[in-house]
Amino acid sequence: MRTLTHDEARARAQEHIERAVAALPVQPTLTVQRDDALECDDPKDRGPRGRYEVGKTYWLDDLPGDRNAEIVDALVEHWTSHDFRVLADHRDADDRFVSVQHDGDAFRMSVTQSIEGDLSLGASSPCIWLDGGTDD
């Protein structure tokens, strides 16, 4: 089966991020933290090596820090109502972290609160061939 290409995976990650941000009660300024492709050295899907995980992560800037819990709750509500399955939910911790995976395309998303109280939102693809090749 053909995988997404690098460009297609980047675009899909961006789409997932934009949909999640649109669901927030206040709109942040997005500042790129990560935009890269990392080799799947130990693929979770037990597939062949040489494929890559394409990811994008943004800082959610210009948000009132006292609303972090509300913002994370809004993300979880958006995800669970749009075919994402919760993998980890640590909303009660000082360093909030929630990770989800989309049932349709296997993209993963997460929201993380830094020690300083800043939130970041990321999306990453499953392992793909950068040229969209097949696993056979």
Image: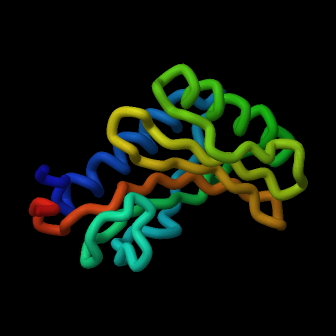
Q: Nearer the viewer, residue 75 or 83?
A: 83
Where does residue 34 sit, x and y in percent of width and height?
A: 47, 69
The answer to whether residue 33 is visible is yes
In which quarter of the view is residue 129 placed? bottom left
Judge left or right: residue 125 versus residue 33.
left
Q: Identify whether 45 is placed above or below 83.
A: below
Position of residue 91 relative to residue 7, above or below, is above
Query: Where does the image place residue 25, in percent across and percent down from the top left?
Result: 65, 27
Which residue is found at the position 12% from the left and 52% from the top? 2
Q: Is residue 58 left or right of residue 117?
A: left
Q: Quadrant of the C terminus?
A: bottom left
Is 15 situated above or below 136? above
Name the spot of residue 26 as percent of width and height, x first: 64, 32
Res 134 quadrant in image: bottom left
Residue 132 visible to an observer of this rendering: no
Q: Pick the residue in front: 83 or 6.
A: 83
Say which residue appears at 43% left-offset and 75% top-offset: 42
Residue drawn at the location 51% of the way across and 32% of the way down:
84
Horizontally, is 5 left or right of 12 in the view?
left
